[in-house]
């Protein structure tokens, strides 16, 4: 029987150094550093719903309306790593979301990995969606010959209650940064401009403009943000008021702290971005030991030089 990989999740508001941690962990030979999976996957379907492997693959291999809209208006997130010469390169609005960042960060030929998964994932047994997510990441680890996976999504604090409830044995890294710097960075990032819009719309109207069922009445103030009507100017305009993103930071932080307090994860490491910048070797050594890397001290010493002084947004 194949030994299951170790599992870990980085929880953060986003724009606080979590992508940096993922990129550094990618250099460890025993670690599959998975990026931007759970923030989308956790919202694909209700977790109390059991689905077949084929239906689950259909959820992974579809295009995301929000990402497609960003491609359409010429504001793709810089984290998108899909090669321009790839199968969907001529029309990124149709790009399966799992290829945009998650698979493209793992291999220079994400289409080939996508095809391999298209053969394997539909054979998953019928099970709850959260079990599918774990099986999928376990499979990626096996295919990559890695002993553990560490998942990171920008804004995962939003789905922290789901993550900690669904994966109680996973190691949890909670990464924070001061709100002012985080909010300023969010206000300039198209993905977080969309996240803030969606969270605000849910609170104000009870509607997510990117998940509105047909025949639903849409308030006039929300119509300009529908996927087919959204413009680059409308999105940039939302980034001018940093207070919106301070509110988002407060909301996401509360989500994460409440989830951690409720779940009381057995394996929890709290990190501050400011400490990482101030003492990268010490903080990365702490992270490496927590994740049980083969040579945490050596890994930290090797990659610490990539931790730079942040540029103010």
Image: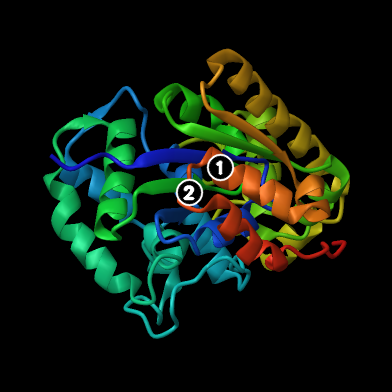
Considering the image in quadrants, where does the C terminus appear?
A: bottom right
Q: From this viewpoint, is residue 228 visible?
A: no
Q: Residue placed farthest to the bottom in the image?
A: 85
Mark carried by residue 293 = 2
| Disc 2/disc 1 C-alpha distance (Å) | 6 Å
Mark carried by residue 54 = none
Scheme by which the image is coloured: rainbow
Taking depth in this image into account, of 234 and 57 the one nearest to the observer is: 57
Q: Is residue 64 above or below residue 270?
A: below
Taking depth in this image into account, of 182 and 216 the one nearest to the observer is: 182
Q: Position of residue 58 (x, y in %)?
A: 25, 50
Dots 2 and 1: beta carbons under 8 Å?
yes
Q: Where is residue 158 in the image (x, y as percent from the top left)?
A: 60, 34
Taking depth in this image into account, of 87 and 268 the one nearest to the observer is: 268
The residue that disc 1 covers is: 289
Task: Specify whether 118 is left or right of 25.
Answer: left
Q: Is residue 305 above or below residue 224?
A: below
Q: Position of residue 194 (x, y in %)?
A: 64, 51
Q: Residues within 10 Å of mark 1 (few under 14, many from 20)?
A: some
Q: Residues within 10 Å of mark 2 (few under 14, many from 20)?
A: many
Q: Residue at x 30, y 72 (%)?
A: 111
Q: Where is residue 259 in the image (x, y as percent from the top left)?
A: 59, 21
Q: For the image shown, how many numbered marks are present on the structure? A: 2
Q: In this view, does 304 lie above or below 225?
A: below
Q: Which residue is drawn at 80% across and 46% down?
A: 275
Residue 280: quadrant of the picture? bottom right
């Amino acid at each position: 029987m194949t030994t299951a990989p170790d599992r870990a999740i980085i929880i953060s508001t986003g724009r606080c150094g979590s992508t940096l941690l993922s990129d550094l962990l990618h250099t460890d030979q025993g670690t599959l550093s998975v990026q931007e999976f759970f923030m989308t996957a956790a919202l694909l379907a209700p977790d109390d719903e059991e689905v077949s492997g084929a239906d689950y693959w259909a959820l992974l291999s579809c295009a995301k309306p929000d990402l497609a809209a960003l491609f359409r208006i010429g504001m793709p997130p810089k984290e998108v790593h899909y090669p321009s010469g790839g199968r969907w390169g001529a029309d990124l609005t149709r790009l399966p979301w799992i290829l945009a960042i998650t698979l493209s960060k793992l291999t220079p030929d994400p289409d080939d990995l996508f095809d391999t998964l298209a053969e394997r994932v539909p054979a998953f047994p019928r099970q709850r969606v959260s079990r599918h997510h774990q099986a999928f990441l376990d499979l990626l680890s096996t295919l990559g010959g890695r002993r553990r996976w560490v998942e990171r999504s920008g804004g995962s604090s939003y789905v922290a209650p789901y993550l900690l409830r669904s994966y109680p044995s996973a190691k949890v890294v909670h990464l924070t940064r001061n709100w002012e710097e985080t909010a300023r960075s969010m206000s300039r990032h198209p993905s977080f401009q969309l996240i803030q819009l969606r969270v605000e719309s849910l609170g104000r109207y009870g509607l997510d403009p990117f998940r509105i069922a047909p025949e639903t009445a849409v308030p006039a103030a929300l119509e300009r943000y529908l996927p087919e009507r959204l413009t680059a100017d409308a999105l940039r305009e939302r980034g001018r008021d940093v207070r919106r993103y301070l509110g988002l930071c407060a909301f996401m932080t509360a989500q994460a702290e409440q989830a951690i307090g409720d779940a009381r994860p057995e394996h929890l490491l709290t990190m501050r971005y400011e400490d990482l910048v101030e003492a990268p070797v010490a903080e990365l050594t702490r992270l490496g030991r927590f994740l049980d890397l083969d040579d945490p001290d050596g890994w930290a010493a090797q990659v610490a030089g990539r931790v730079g002084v942040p540029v103010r947004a």
